[in-house]
Amino acid sequence: MTVHRVQGQTMPSMIVDLESCKGTEAAYIMLSQASSIDGVAIFRLFSQKRIQCAMSQD
């Protein structure tokens, strides 16, 4: 499934490919749809920049 398709749903288990994320928002959406961390499997190694963003200057 795509990130947009799972948005707003809760998934009991999922395999996520964080390296394919185009921004930190996509990674957040993917991971936040899991009902438990026990149900999340990460497909492959990913760069830290996929889940880390700079702080706002505000």
Image (tube, rainbow, N blue to C red):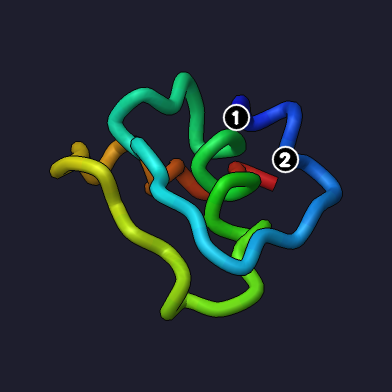
Q: Residue 56 location, x and y as percent?
A: 60, 44
- Residue at 64%, 46% in the rendered image: 29
Q: Nearer the viewer, residue 47 or 41?
A: 41
Q: Nearer the viewer, residue 54 or 42?
A: 42
- Residue at 54%, 56% in the rendered image: 31
Question: Mark 1 touching mark 2, by CB under 8 A?
Answer: yes
Q: Residue 54 location, x and y as percent?
A: 45, 43
Horizontal side of residue 9 vs 31, given as left or right: right
Horizontal side of residue 33 vs 14, given as left or right: right
Residue 47's place in the image compared with 21, above or below, is below
Among numbered discs 1 and 2, the one appearing first in the sequence:
1
The amino acid at mark 2 is Val
Residue 26: quarter of image: top right
Q: Which mark is residue 6?
A: 2
Q: Gap between marks 1 and 2, in whole Å?
A: 7 Å
Horizontal side of residue 1 vs 39, given as left or right: right
Q: Residue 52 location, x and y as percent?
A: 38, 47
Q: Secondary structure at mark 1?
A: loop
- Residue at 52%, 49% in the rendered image: 55
The amino acid at mark 1 is Met
**Residue beneath disc 1:** 1
